[in-house]
Every structure is written in C-alpha cells, then in structure tokens.
Amino acid sequence: MKVLIACEESQAVCIAFRERGHEAYSCDILPCSGGHPEWHIQGDVRSYLDEGWNMMIAFPPCTFISHVGNRALKENPERKQKQMDAVDFFMQLYNAPIHKICVENPRGWMTHYFRREDQVIEPFEFGHPERKRTCLWLKNLPPLMKGPVNPAGMMPKKVIKRKTGQRAGGNYGYYYVQGKKAGEKSKTFPCIAKAMAEQWG
C-alpha cells in the first residue's frame, strides 16, 4: 500500500508502516529527523496529494486552531487570518483525493468549523506512560482499537495536578507532555504509530 504521512518530520508513523512492508513516505517542509531521508519528501504536502496514494495520515500544525491559542487570538486580531489559513489547510488535507484519510489534531476550532472528531485517543490507552489527548478525523478508516492500557492511566485524572513534564506524583508512573518543548510535543508516540500501522496497514 502507498501511504503518505503528511506534516511529519519525525518519521515515527512512516517507519512503522515501512516495517510492515508498505511504501510509506513522510512529507514536511522541514528535513526529516527520523534517519531515513530516502523516505522523506521535503516540501508543501499540498503539491503531492494527487500522486496515487492509498492512504494518508496527516498531522497539520495546531498552533492557530487548538483551544490553547484562544486567548492569544482575542488579544491579536492578526492571528484570526492565520487561524482561517490553518482551517483551510486542515480541510484541504481531509478533502484530498485519497481513499483512506486520518487527520490528527488536538481538540479545538475544527469541532466548530467542521464537525466533531471521530475518535479521541490518549497514549496511555496504548500502553505508553503519558497523557496527550488527541483527536482523529477519519475517512474510510475504522477507529483504532485501544490497548493494552497502561495501569497508571486508569488513575483518576484529578490526581494528576502538575503540568511541568515531570513525574506527576510518586506512584502514578506516567507523565504529562505539556511541559515539553513544542517540537517534542508534536512527535507521534511510537505506540500510536505502531497501532496505526498494524490496524490500518
């Protein structure tokens, strides 16, 4: 299967599909950091959407369309146009001429501009000791089956109070990602990349 991983420089999902024998390519305006430049297309992904892909998994930037930026949007009207550009980019990816599509983003403005997400996932639901709520908009793809759940992820959310990227309590064993740098937070967790490749590949 020919798979396009849009807006991915880490190559986590690309490599997961390659390991299962698929012809997968990451695409981003940045050079790849995953160690396989031969599997990377550096450029605007919109220039490569009509090249016979069977599937696309896209990770468009969320800077201007997540709820995190709402306050800054009100304080800086110029961000409104950037928000609309981000919405348009999201929709170009979702409406691409590709049969199977997944577009990933945090919960934010796409719920209002487009529709509710098809699935919400967390890394701990796939065995990774971390929280990062992620929404998936799916086209001709089933929701990901979750598991094995990390036992720490079953603790009540109210127990976790710190958002510093450090250990959130002595016995709970998983971490928030909010304290990490933006580039680190945007990378796909290997457990989720593996689930996508195993279940959708």
Image (cartoon, grey):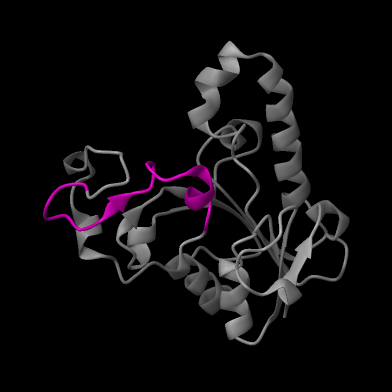
Q: Outermost residue, left direction?
A: 171
Q: Is residue 55 left or right of residue 48?
A: left
The image quadrant that residue 63 belongs to is top right
Where residue 28 appears, as percent x and y from the top left, is 72, 56
Check the image and report above or below for 37 versus 29. Answer: below
User: Residue at point 40% right, 49% down?
Assistant: 132
Check the image and report above or below for 146 versus 110. Answer: below
- Of residues 32 and 173, the one nearer the viewer is 32
Q: Is residue 123 left or right of residue 118?
A: left
- Highlighted magenta segment, given as a residue range: 168-187
User: Residue at point 74% right, 51% down?
Assistant: 93
Where residue 172 appears, as percent x and y from the top left, is 16, 55
User: Residue at point 50% right, 39% down?
Assistant: 107
Q: Which quadrant is the C terminus positioned in?
A: bottom right
Check the image and report above or below for 87 versus 56. Answer: above
User: Residue at point 29% right, 66% down?
Assistant: 149
Q: Is residue 201 in sight in this rendering?
A: no
Check the image and report above or below for 13 versus 94. Answer: below
Q: Is residue 121 left or right of residue 77?
A: left
Asked if residue 126 lies in the magenta stretch, the reply is: no
Q: Which quadrant is the N terminus positioned in?
A: bottom right
- Main secondary structure of the magenta stretch: loop
Where residue 25 appears, as percent x and y from the top left, is 72, 71
The image quadrant that residue 153 belongs to is bottom left
Where residue 9 appears, as percent x and y from the top left, is 64, 60
Q: How many marks?
A: 0
The image quadrant that residue 15 belongs to is bottom right
